[in-house]
Image: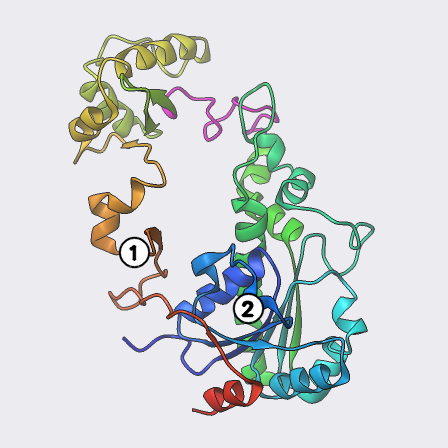
Amino acid sequence: MTKVLAGLRVLEFAAIGPVPWSGMVLADLGASVVRVERPGSQGEKDTLGAVRRGRLQVELDLKSAAGREEALRLIASADVLLEGLRPGVMERLGLGPADALAANPRLVYARMTGWGQQGPMAQEAGHDINYIALTGALHAIGPAERPVPPLNLIGDFGGGGAFLLIGLLAALWQVRSSGRGQVVDAAMVDGAATLMAMIYSRHALGQWKDERVSNPLDGGLPWYDTYRTADGKFMAVGALEPQFYDELLRRLDLSGRLPDRQAPEAWPVIRARFAEVFATRTRDDWARHFAGSDACVSPVLSLAEAPLHPHNAARGNFVAHGPGHVPGAAPVFDGERPPVAADSQRVSVQQALAAWQR
């Protein structure tokens, strides 16, 4: 297939978390991504594995005059620059937005930080758990006793990488009409807050309690929760709408045998009955039982199991990589899923520039 971002030239300065993830997405969609790394990094263990796929890798000592000049040569030919260093670091290297836009007035300079380029906490260290703590997202997730971090999906990748991509693609659209470059200040704390828009709206309308396990989507409802099966695994239940709930009861042989779900005082009884019934069969037996139904019930799969599920396999959601699998490219365009980008290659600056000219 023709990749949708073919011809887009992206210069990525090595960082952790959402920046390499964003570079991976851009490379999978066809962008030509050159990643600048510090000298000697070739021998380091690549803990990010397939996330670094699809790059031309260039080693530059950005603290030297020669390294800075080589970086500016790349900047002059790029459409997008990605960086995820602490605020002020790129400026001290002589590669901040002013220097970069002087070399390339049409450049989209996309910056990724936890707290943002400005603000009282801009210079503080942090990780995903800190950023989502400040937005209310962490407070809303987990059992009643304590918040539980939802991996690093909300801050690093949802609020961080995804909004970095949204910002740079929006800026590229603006550059098409104005001819002027843009500086994108993407902060994980900002994006994580935006992801919470629906929850905050419902809270403002009095439709969401500020307590965990008290609401429709946080495990407060018995019909939107997980249940242990006979083999110690779990089934996920999401039967929110009445027609889906009725189908759930029918499949569990509980129709007409439970109290009205409109009465909150009945929820503990309903939950206990669901738990009792799900515990009578194995997870895979339940999965077969609910297959093809509208009860909104699914098996909770492990990382090893998910790539092998027939639906994921049919859609190409995972691809083989080394001894296991990694997620494929997304989304699908005109019925075709983009293939994942090839393995990265280490090249010289001249070779990277030549690749951008092709």
Residue 54: say if magenta: no
Number of marks in the rendered image:
2
Q: Position of residue 309 (x, y in %)?
A: 24, 43
Residue 135 relative to residue 89: left or right? left
Q: Earlier in the sequence, mark 1 or mark 2?
A: 2
Picture residue at 56% right of the left edge, 19% below the top: 144
Residue 342 vs residue 105, the one in the foreground: 342
Residue 50 vs residue 323, the one in the foreground: 323
Q: Residue furthest right?
A: 120
Q: Three-letter amino acid code at disc 1? A: Ala
Give the vertical position of 198 relative to 230 (above or below): below
Picture residue at 39% right of the left edge, 16% below the top: 262
Q: Position of residue 138 (x, y in %)?
A: 61, 35
The reply to whether residue 1 is visible in this rendering is yes
Circle 2 SS class: helix
Q: Position of residue 148 (x, y in %)?
A: 57, 30
> Which residue was labeled with disc 2?
42
Residue 57 relative to residue 333: left or right? right
* Magenta-highlighted residues: 204-225
- CB atoms of marks 1 and 2 within 8 Å: no
Look at the image and tell me in which quarter the C terminus lies: bottom left
Residue 190, labelled with which disc? Answer: none
Image quadrant where residue 30 sits: bottom left
Residue 320, labelled with which disc? Answer: 1
| CA neighbours of label 1 inside 10 A, class few (<14), some (14 to 19), many (20+) | few
The reply to whether residue 238 is visible in this rendering is no
Picture residue at 36% right of the left edge, 61% below the top: 329
